[in-house]
Amino acid sequence: MIPTLLGVSIIVFLMLQIVPGDPVNSLLPPDATEEDRQRIKQELGLDKSLIGQYFSWLGNTLQGDFGRSIIKRLEVTDLLFDALSNTFILAFGAAIFAFLLSLIIGVYSAYHPKSWIASLGNIIGLTGVSIPNFWAALILIGIFSVMLGWLPSTGMKGVGGGGIGDTVMHLIMPAIAVGMTTLGVMTRMIRSSVVDLLQKDFIITLQAKGASSFIILMHVLKNCTPTILTVAGLQVGYLIGGSVLVETVFSWPGVGQLIYQGISQRDFPIIQSGVLVISILFVIINLVVDILHAVVDPRIREA
Amino acid sequence: MGPNFTKFSYKTIILLIIVVVTLTACGGNNATSTSESKSLVIAMSAANIPSTDTTPTEGFEGYRFVGHQLYDGLVGWDLTQGDEPADIAPGLAESWETSKEDPNIWTFHLRKDVTFHDGSAFNADSVVFAFDRISNPDSEYYNASTAGGVLSYLKYIDSYEKIDDYTFQIKTKEVYSFLPYDLTFILIPSTEAVKEYGEDYLSHPSGTGPFKFVSMSQGEEIVMEKNESYWGGAPKVDQLILKPMPDASARLAALQSGQVNWAEIPPTESIEQLKSSGFQVLLNDYPHIWPYMLNLKEEPWNDVRVRQAANYAIDREALSTSLLNGVAKPATQVLYEGHPWYNESATKYTYNPEKAKALLAEAGYPDGFDTTFVVPTSGSGNMWPLEMNEFVQKNLKEVGINVKIEAIEWQTLITMYRAGFPDDKEVDAYNVSLAPIAPWTFDRYFATSSFIPNGTNIMEYSNKELDEIIKKARETFDVAERDKYLNEAGKIVADDAPWIFVVHDQNLRVLAENVKGFVQPQSWFADLKTISIE
């Protein structure tokens, strides 16, 4: 784990050095001179050597200090904390939407391949993964905000608003837009693994022994849990790190948006620490998924 | 399940797409009023909330919505009318004059009844503190980030001092009549607030402006409330809320669904629909120019005939009306028609490909030539750079100038641009939009003394006659005389064509029907005090 994170931090750092552009530009008016740029760069200590910059960042980070944003001039820790909480809300909403719906549609259409729900499952499986989610976001806004006026199209709360209800209203569309891909992937995966399991010898034996359909369903679900967990684990990572475009369309102040803005302004402390924190999350989620595997699947525990 | 199903889902998808597109296209708007009737809620085009310090980030949009709302400078802008270019007006200084014996000495008489939002009093000490903070690296409260934004406005200031509690004096390095324009960018913070909050000042900004800071949540919004005791008259709305929304469609949706009542630059295709559903679509001239800065150090652009040829080759009318739906006007000079520095008798670059070809042939390029333009992909004031550049590319190709467009991300481009034309890379022009808002325009962009690194005359364009006129303009304190010189400068620059002039933006913004009392000024800035919501 430590080597992975160290590696990530070095790669991100080096990439930032290769990319041209300079955070100082965001502090200067467009007609400022080259002389001004050099002077401010020096005064802000951004002209130090590469290795020196990296180690001073690493040293501070190890002490839990992410430093200050160069452009926003606020504590990176505070910025990241707020943005991550918002991203978690979005990822959580998207996960609930995608996991629940895919489980229901996936299992049902495996049982009833000729039903309309199975057809719906097919459409979702196809469109979910093929429609770009920022486009879906715009279409959702067009229908539910502009035409029908049911849902708000931006931000996390209304003007002067607040409270959980208000946030939930703001969450619905972004959660659907972000969760769509996951829904598509998981519906297909759950359906095919359930179809597969239904033809397994142990299920046929259960049927022959006269087990109720509920008992059989439980057996099926238990046996496809490891597959679902693996895919879901990967998808959670995607939901946290991969919603940049949707966050931009809905002006959702999450970590994707924060890092994206950091990149466009070359705000090194935000990018560097933001990527590090996301990497840590990825590693932790993978670890949790591995542990859960062992919990639900005795075969892995024994191995 | 196989083939039949695929066919079915195909049809369904196509049908769904058709339904959705039709619905979206026909969609009127049925929710125009905001729930909070006394809040002015603005969808900004900036991606970030501008810094709340005295030098806002996010370019002039930052000054427009944050800087000038929270703070005042000694000098401000008169934004009350839209028929003429906005000019300066008294700010925290009621009046000012230069000394008869020494025109380098400026005396400012400050307002006496002004308090900062935190309750502390405004006086000459506040002004000295503000200047120390941005120009005196030895001062305890010097802040390099804040200084960066205003360095170019401090260039001519030699020294400054407090004369008495309400009198402040500035000494310039040479005779410089444009000083008041520079001072509009130097905003005055509360000394006490800066000292008390230190690095956290940005979360507790305190100025003297028409709106007070309330709260800010990053990436989402900044909330301000009206300053009841504003010296220039309290704003009519109770609250001002700014939301950064870099995506034009998102701004449009937020406006149509009533979540904001003011949107900067929605997609131009939406203008007609917005008008017909009762929104106020505002356009006006303002000092903006979308040009190409040419590399005059090398062939072929060192030949004035080639530069004029390129200027004749562009169909600006079609670009402004067809491509941009009328949100821009053709530009043939630095300033627009009707502006005092627009020169009537200068070469008029109409769309004339034949003349362009003739000029090219005369210059020795009958078959044209290849050239490379570096252009941005986005960025403040750059409008719709890719579409517009492709349009110009086609125009120039018709006369034989084969442009290779190199589109570069904005931050990278601005770094390159500041450093001028590189020696190790083929760059013949930069496409960067500028704001010729003050009399220093010609001085900064075209004077020989503004070569890199002292200025942004990256073309290395040099004309002795122009340099003299600029100097005269800089040294006269008579506004009419100054404008006469700058008008002449406008002609010289247009005739010499160190730039390819393309269009002037028209400052598109859309307001909800119930937002009353706003005047769209000929300026990058805006007066929000007069607005009421009915």
Image: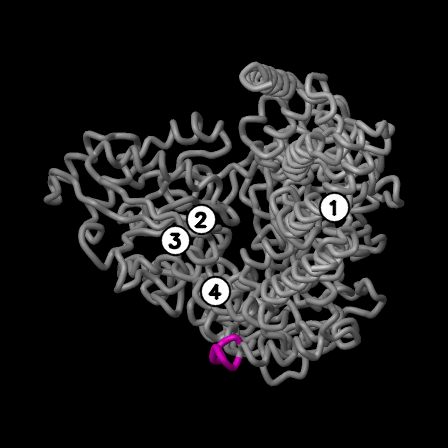
What residue sits 63% from the left and 44% below the top? Answer: A248
Label 2 belongs to which residue? B433
Which residue lies under the disc numbered 4? Answer: A15
- Residue type of the residue flagged with mark 4: Met
User: Of the residues under marks 2 and 3, which one precedes in the sequence?
Assistant: 2
Asked whether B396 or B498 is in front, the reply is: B396
The magenta-colored residue range is A46-52
In the picture, residue A158 is in which quadrant? top right
Q: CA distance from mark 1 to mark 4?
A: 29 Å
Which residue lies under the disc numbered 1? A90
Whether A48 is among the magenta residues is: yes
In the drawing, does residue B467 fall left or right of residue A229? left
Q: Are marks 3 and 4 in contact (CB under 8 Å)?
A: no
Closer to viewer: mark 3 or mark 4? 4
Q: Disc 3 versus disc 4: distance between alpha carbons?
A: 50 Å
Separation of disc 2 and disc 3 at Cα? 24 Å
Quadrant placement of the N terminus of chain A: bottom right
